[in-house]
Image (cartoon, rainbow, N blue to C red):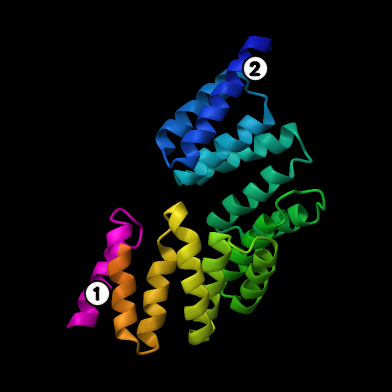
Amino acid sequence: MNSDDQKMAQLHLQMGLSQMNSGNYPQALSEMLTAENLDPDNPVIQNNLGLAYFVRERYDLAEEHIQKALSLKSDYTDARNNLSGVLAERGRFDEALAAAQKAADDLTYPSPEKPLINMGIVYFKTQKYDLAKKSFLRAMTLQRDNCVANSYYGRSLYELKALKPAADALDHAVGFCQRSQFDEPQYYSALTYFELGQKQKAEARLEELIRLYPQGNYVNRAKSMLETIRK
């Protein structure tokens, strides 16, 4: 491999990561593909290319590239953790849980909250809400302001019908998730307040969601719910 190609690959990788962090996913994917063409056997590039496909919901291609990263570097814990997330989205829950557990077993992994979150997501998707709650709570002890952990912790409490604790947890999640433009806790906060009989708080949450996240995943559901409440 030409060292100049490797240097250019690193440059495109960094540009791709910057685009990913800014939410410019098509451009991020383009940069990652350029990096791969320049340095196809770089496990870091393969792992991040997998993540670029993951956010575009091409889970088949995400798995392909993350598996390649692991074939190039078998002890690549971050790739193994990312594989867990992909497998969970593909409904292969036993494999996802095993991959997350293996990632969690690596005591040198600098982001130990991540496999705990993936385990929690598997438990949540398989309706094991008490186990999910415990996994997310453990993740939050490691990274208190983690958006996904806080959101799913609140949702787990909601599914367990612990509505008042769920409302409190989702209120925290709303604050933590604004900077990442993640509107899910806003919607479930509104739903929880509505079930608690606090319609004004529910309306306020829905109005805030529509205002802050006009292109969000939950905006249409928020508008529909707001119409139902006001009838």
Range of the magenta residues? 210-231
Disc ID at residue 75: none
Task: Please name whichever residue, 13 or 96, is drawn nearer the observer in this view of the structure.
Answer: 13
In percent of the image, x 68 and y 57: which residue is there? 115
Dominant secondary-structure state across the stretch colored magenta:
helix
Please identify the quarter of the rendering in which residue 75 is found: top right
In x, y percent, where is residue 158? 49, 80
Dot 1 crowding, Cα within 10 Å, few <14, some 14–19, many 20+: some
Disc ID at residue 226: 1
- Looking at the picture, which amino acid does disc 2 mark? Gln
Dot 2 crowding, Cα within 10 Å, few <14, some 14–19, many 20+: some
Figure quadrant of the N terminus: top right
Q: Secondary structure at mark 2?
A: helix
In x, y percent, where is residue 208? 31, 66
- Vertical comparison of 143 with 196: above or below: above
| Res. 95 in view | no
- Vertical comparison of 76 with 81: above or below: above
In percent of the image, x 51 and y 39: which residue is there? 52
In x, y percent, where is residue 70? 71, 38
Disc 2/disc 1 C-alpha distance (Å)? 53 Å
In percent of the image, x 37 and y 76: which residue is there? 190
Task: Please name whichever residue, 145 or 55, is drawn nearer the observer in this view of the structure.
Answer: 145
- Vertical comparison of 194 with 127: above or below: below
Q: Is residue 220 magenta?
A: yes
Q: Residue furthest bottom?
A: 197
Q: How many marks?
A: 2
Figure quadrant of the C terminus: bottom left
In percent of the image, x 56 and y 20: which residue is there? 37
- Looking at the picture, which amino acid does disc 1 mark? Leu
Residue at image mark 2: 6
Which numbered disc flags the more N-terminal residue, 2 or 1? 2
